Every structure is written in structure tokens, then in C-alpha cells.
Image: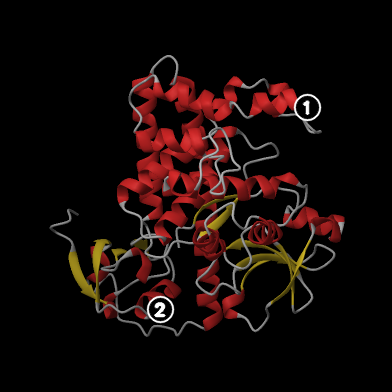
Amino acid sequence: MSKAAQMQIPLSELKVGMTVKLPLSWTDHPFLFNQIEIEKTAHIELIKTLDVSFVYLIAGCELLTPQASPKVEVTQVMPEQLAADSQILVRKSIRLGQQRFTKGASDCRATFSKIGSDPQGAYRSAATLVEDLMDHLKETDCPHLALVNPGEDISVNQHGVSIAVLSMMIGQALSMNHSQLRDIAMGALFHDIGKQKVPDVIRRKKGLLTEHEINFLNMHPKYGYDMLDKSGLFPSEVLDIILHHHEWVDGSGYPDGLKGKQIPLTTQVVSLVNDFDHILRSEEGLAPQVALGYLFKNRTGKHEAQLISTLVKVLGIYPPGTMVQLSDGDIAKVMLTTSQVQKPVVWSCSIDGQKARLRFLAEEPHEIIGVLKVDELSTSAVKTLDGNATVSFYFSSL
């Protein structure tokens, strides 16, 4: 059925088996997409709770005929059924975030491989990836963060995608324009590409680096800048992010020791997020909430106070990946931020790792009463909650 031929039908005529489209924006309903295949009566009841008097019928016209669809009394759906449907939608959203993150990292890796041999192709691929990120950011008026798992050893491209997502969230919160958000996205994706010029033995070293190794590693912003600048394709704002993402506003950063407004705001945002990510990974088992608290207390003067406050707002009181203790005795991992910052979506289990389930704390009387370290959990609980997984972020589609 073409868009022009889509039929408006009142909610009273909704039937299981129809495919309909909601006349609402993404943010005004709990479904994953505007187009919905009605698979159960609970879907109808959810639609009836929305602020609409009709929907567009996409498929299932035959269900409108009296012969195919005799009028029946609609059974009232209990609140627990609606809650179950909400859980399905959130699970889908978490899976979608993971899929998008994985694809973004794969696309980023392919883009990196073209920089030397096909710079124009690399730029086109990067621009496409940036537009995908922009689309995902703009799917909701108030985007939230979802936890994603990059695997045991996070790569440069996975790191770039996670930094891009969190940086774009900050840019959005600061009301940056479309062009600034695009610059942030592309600069964040490429910010560590210069590490390709640093030997693996230095990049992957677990112990303390020697002074020579530190100096070599600290050259990566310049290496990355040179790699992209010679193509003549990348905007100066993007190149600045790549060259100066380790600059701090007090002048103690590198490579140029820039201060204050010498560092563009877009570059400051990526520098802050990159610093937070470095703190998060600097100590094994460090909770994102603890890393955020460390940055807030110990980076005063290194980053603009407004930017740090915005990062705290975006990540929430309990950032995704944080292990927490619940008031009912269960333990949990934060999976998704919500508009109620103290009530995120969590994956919980008992202290012995049993009875795992997804929980919406905003719909419960129970609350978070503390933050836990992974080494405080039982072995079975760590396994159930995937407690040793690396923490990365992507936009939530809900």
C-alpha cells in the first residue's frame, strides 16, 4: 500500500494481525519503530493509551471486513502484560544499540584501511558513518545511553565510536548545531588513528611505559593529523580535534600546551570524554560511576566546569556499566539511562547469580543503595552480570 493510499482507521477497529503506523514522533510512544505489527491484544491496549484517535493501516485490510473479523469483546490487558511488552521493547533497544555499535566499529575499521590508498573513499565512508550516528542521535528528542560490549580488548575503532557517541550527547546537551555535531563525530572517530603509527609493543604494554615509550605514544595526535591533513579533504575543525584531543584548558596537555579558548569547544568536548574513558580503563574493575566521580574531583581546572557538569548529566548518577546494590538485596548492572536519573534500567540477579532479569527501577519501589566493585561480587554473579566486560556506550533507541 503506498503512502498516499494509507488508510486512517480509528483505534476501535484495531485487530491482531494488522500492521499499522503511528501518527506520532519517535519520542511519543514506547514502541521500537513507528510501524508496528500487532501480534497480540496487549499491543492494541498500548496503542490505546497513546494520545491518538487513529492510526494508518499498512497491511491487514481484510481484517476490516465483517466476514473476516466479527466484532468481539476486547479482553482487558493487565498491567503486568503491558510491563512484559515494555521489557521486550527495551531488550530490542539494547540489542539494536549493540548491533549498531558493532557495525559502526566495523565501518570505522574499513574506513581506516582506506586512508593511505584511497583517501577520497575513506572520507566518503567516514561521512556516511557520521550521518548514521547523527540519525541515531536524533531518533529521540532526549536521547539516553545504552551499555554495549566491545569485547575483551577494545580496538581503536571501537574506542572511537564510543567516544563519538558520548561526545555527541554532550554536544546535543549544549545545543550545538548540526555542523558542530558532525565535526565532533568525525573528529572523535578518527582521534586515535595516529596510534596506527605506534608499535603494538608500546600500545598494548600492560606495565608502566618508559620515558622513550611515553614520548613515542604522545606523538600519535601529530601522526593522525598528518595522515588526514595531506588528503586535503577533512575540515579544519576535525583536524583540530585529532591534533589537540589531549590538550587541557590549564595548558598542561600536549602536543602544543594550549590554554582555555585556544582550544575550540568541539575539541574540548572530545578531550574531556577521552579523559573520562582513559580513567575508566586505567584500573581494572573500576566502576563508571567511580571513574566519573574521580574526574569530577581531580580534573578541576583541566576541563571547563560546564563541560564536566554536562558529562555528569549525560551519564547520569549511575552510568551504564556500573555495578550496584539494590534495596531488595539483589545486585545489578546498569544497562540504560532514563529520564529518572536515579532509576535506570538494570540487569539484576541474586547475590549467588540466580534469578537474572531485566528491571525498570522507575516502575518499582526498590532503588539503588550503593555502588559495587566487581571483586565484591561472587564468581557466579560476575558471570551472570558479565561483570568483567569492557564498558562502551551507544545511543538508546527508546
Residue reaching furthest to the top: 117
Tell me if I can see residue 282 in this picture.
yes
Say the numbered circle drawn on residue 45. Answer: 2
Find numbered disc 2 in the image and state the secondary structure of the residue it sits on.
Answer: helix
Q: Which residue is drawn at 34% across and 33% down?
A: 235
Q: Which quadrant of the rendered structure holds the N terminus?
A: bottom left
Look at label 1 and name its amino acid.
Thr
On the picture, is 222 further left or further right than 143? Answer: right
- Name the residue type under label 2: Glu
Estimate how packed mark 1 is, as few (under 14), some (14 to 19) or many (20 or more) residues with alpha carbons within 10 Å.
Answer: few
Mark count: 2
Q: Is residue 16 visible in this depiction of the protein?
A: no
Q: Which residue is drawn at 46% across and 22% down?
A: 226
Label 2: few (<14), some (14–19) or many (≥20) C-alpha neighbours in 10 Å: some
Say which residue appears at 56% left-offset and 72% top-offset: 341
Give the labeled residue for mark 1: 210
| Residue placed most toward the observer, 192 or 97 | 192
Q: Which residue is drawn at 18% across and 61% down?
A: 6
Quarter occupied by residue 38 = bottom left
| Badge 1 or badge 2: first in the primary sequence | 2
Q: Which of marks 1 and 2 is in front?
A: 1
Classify the position of the C terminus by image quarter. bottom left
Question: In the depicted view, which residue is nearer to us: 395 or 160?
Answer: 160
Label 1 – label 2 distance at C-alpha: 64 Å
Residue 53, position in %: x, y?
Answer: 25, 79
